[in-house]
Image: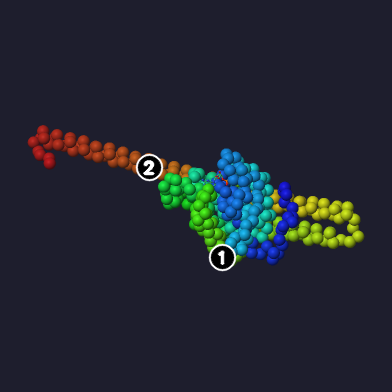
Amino acid sequence: MGGSTIDDDWEFGSASDGVQTVVLFGRTGHGKSATGNSILGRKAFKSVASFDGVTNTCELQRTVLDDGQIINVIDTPGLFDILVKPEFIGKEIVRCIDMAKDGIHAVLVVLSIRTRITKEEASAIETLQRFFGNKISEYMIVVFTNGDYIEENEETFDDFLSRSESVKAVLEICGNRWVLFDNRTKDAAKKAEQLQQLLSLVKKVVMKNGGKPYSDELFVELKNGALKLHDEAAEVNSFEGYSKEEKSQLEVQMYKTYEEHLKQITEMVETRLRETTRRLEQQLAEEQAARLKAEATAQQAQIKSNDEIRKLREHLERAHRETEELRRHAKHGGCQIL
Ligand SMILES: Nc1nc2c(ncn2[C@@H]2O[C@H](COP(=O)(O)OP(=O)(O)OP(=O)(O)O)[C@@H](O)[C@H]2O)c(=O)[nH]1
Ligand SMILES: [Mg+2]
């Protein structure tokens, strides 16, 4: 995993307590990096209009809020985009977990309201939920970007919501926590207000989860591996009677073992990813089959009811003809039928 060795600025133990980590998640071009920059209050992440993905790898930036709260913001590439290879996703997930270290306090699901939100967007979020388990939903907040679009088009946010079943599905997964963001605004008051809204949602999520960030065995494995490397490096440095060459050989060996450990975790992630995708595809196929079956049944019922209507109509026409016949007979026979 490129560059994923132990960082010099990694704070162990209590030093990292109190730091909150938020991860930006979403498909390419929805405004993850721009939202990250809005949170940081500076242009730290590259954010431009492009047909291709702009962010190629996970990146961490840090900010200190007015109240002293330290926030780590992790920007990610468009994971779970249709054409992205599982090996790439696997590596980036490991990189992201490695950066988050103690866990994730909030997952910011970024969705642009300028883009049509389709089943693909919803299924990317569902894949994330399946991959990490339902617990991750409790950390999710939807950040709708391009808030300026609503103003330009004199729409209400409810109009936008009512147009898409997929958005409703995403909101449901994310516990209906959402905020509307305009990453292009120059209005300082608006900037401050929307950021405040987002931060108070993050605070709510943190409180609801008892201050415990999201973490699972992957986080633990990665952290343990890195801690081991850190301790071993310190130990080797303290060795007396070893030459510089001997120490550097030991270090090379340590890093090799650590890289091996990372490789194993990446493989674990890839396996879990493949299994998640397989299950999701199977579920979608089952849903599709059930839908087709229901449609066929409804069609048959329609044919049956059309058939019955036709029979009824024939029956009525026959009755009508017989009445006419009787009427004619009665007329010729001198009786009167009303
Ligand atoms: N008008 C407007 N444009 C926005 C807003 N947010 C993002 N954009 C623009 O949308 C484009 C894509 O934004 P990015 O931040 O690069 O999107 P991303 O999700 O990081 O994309 P990738 O890195 O490719 O995955 C850029 O041109 C941004 O300036 C917004 O709120 N309003
Ligand atoms: Mg980006």
Q: Nearer the viewer, residue 173 or 229?
A: 229
Q: Earlier in the sequence, mark 1 or mark 2?
A: 1
SS at badge 1: helix
Whole-Å distance between the Cαs marked 1 and 2?
54 Å
The answer to which quarter of the image holds residue 39 is: bottom right
Circle number at residue 315: none
Name the spot of residue 327 as percent of width and height, x first: 14, 36
Residue denoted by label 2: 302
| Protein image colouring | rainbow
| Residue at 31% from the left image edge and 41% from the top image edge | 309
Question: From the viewer's perspective, is 123 left or right of 326?
Answer: right
Q: Can residue 104 be seen in this snapshot?
A: no
> Does residue 285 sit above or below 328 in this rendering?
below
Q: Cβ(mark 1) to ligand 1 < 8 Å?
A: no
| Residue at 87% from the left image edge and 61% from the top image edge | 239
Residue type beneath disc 2: Gln
Question: From the viewer's perspective, is 256 left or right of 171?
Answer: right
Residue denoted by label 1: 207
Q: Nearer the viewer, residue 39 or 207?
A: 39
Question: From the viewer's perspective, is 169 left or right of 85?
Answer: left
| Residue at 62% from the left image edge and 48% from the top image edge | 45
Residue type beneath disc 1: Met
Name the spot of residue 104 as percent of width and height, x first: 62, 58
| Residue at 61% from the left image edge and 62% from the top image edge | 69
